[in-house]
Amino acid sequence: MNLPFTREQFFAVFRDYNEAVWPLQLLIVVLAFAALVLAVVGGRSAARAACAILAALWAWAGVVYHLGFFLTVNPAAALFGAMFLCAAALFAWEGVVHARLQFDAAGDWRTFAAFVLAGYALVVYPLLAPMLGRDMAEAASFGLPCPVTIFTLGMLGLARRPFPRSVFVVPVLWALIGVQAAWLFGAYEDLGLAVAALAALWFALPARWERTAA
C-alpha cells in the first residue's frame, strides 16, 4: 500500500501532538474515567453527561488531531476529521439531546468485555509504545483516535437496549481503518481495534440473536 507519509512521519505526528497539548492528556483521561463512572451509576442525567463526554472526545480527536496534526502528512485526514465530527454529532444528538443512549452495568459478559476494552484503552494502550521499542513521546496517548475508539466501543458494551445502532458505525469503521497501523507501522497496540470491532458486533446484536447464539 502506497501511503503519502512514512513510518517516521506517522510517529512524529504523535510526538508533535503530545508535546503541543501536554498536559491536557491528563484531563482527557479524567473525563473518560468520569464517563465510565457515569455509565455505571446509570440514570438519564448520568447517561446524558457520559454521552456529552463521548461527543467531546470524538470532536477533540477529529479537530485537534486529524485536522490540526495528521492533515500535515495525510490529505485523507480531512475526511477522517469529518467522520469523527459526525460521530461526535451522533453522540450529542442521540445521547444528549434525545437521551436514547442509556447505560447499565448489568454484571454479565457484555459488561466484563466492556470494562476490559475501556481499561485497555485508558491504561494499557499508551504504555505499550515503549514496550514495542518506541519513545513514550511517540505513544498514542488517550485522546487520539485509536484509544478513543476502543474506549467508546467499550462504553457501548454498557448500552442498555433499545439503543441507536447508528452510534456504532463510525467507531467500527475507524477500528477497521486504524488497525492497519499494526502491520504497516508495527503499532501492535492497535490490534486492540480488531478485538473492539468484533466485540462491537456482539454488543450491537439484537437481544433475540444473543439468546439464540447462547
Image (cartoon, rainbow, N blue to C red):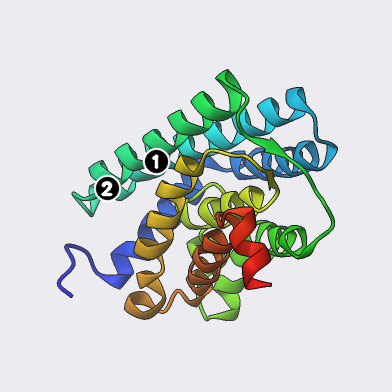
Image quarter for residue 38? top right
Give the Cα distance between marks 1 and 2: 10 Å
Residue 84: give its label. 1
Of the two numbered discs 1 and 2 in the rendering, the one whose residue sits closer to the viewer: 1
The residue shown at (77%, 43%) is 104
Residue closest to the far top: 97
- The percent position of residue 126, horizontal first and vertical second, equals 60, 63
Asked if residue 127 shows in the view, the reply is no
Q: In the shown orientation, is residue 109 left or right of residue 124?
A: right
State the quadrant of the N terminus.
Answer: bottom left
Please tell me how crowded label 1 is: few (under 14), some (14-19), or many (20+) other residues with Cα within 10 Å: many
Q: Secondary structure at mark 1?
A: helix
Q: Nearer the viewer, residue 75 or 201?
A: 201
Amino acid type shown at disc 1: Phe
Image quarter for residue 10? bottom left
Q: In the shown orientation, is residue 123 left or right of residue 165?
A: right
Looking at the image, residue 173 lies above or below residue 60? below
Q: Secondary structure at mark 2?
A: helix
- The percent position of residue 85, horizontal first and vertical second, equals 39, 34
Residue 77: give its label. 2
State the quadrant of the C terminus.
Answer: bottom right
Ranked by sequence position, the earlier of labels 1 and 2 is: 2
- The percent position of residue 162, horizontal first and vertical second, equals 62, 39
Q: In the shown orientation, is residue 31 left or right of residue 75?
A: right
Amino acid type shown at disc 2: Ala
The residue shown at (56%, 65%) is 136
Q: Nearer the viewer, residue 61 or 89?
A: 89
Q: In the shown orientation, is residue 78 left or right of residue 130?
A: left
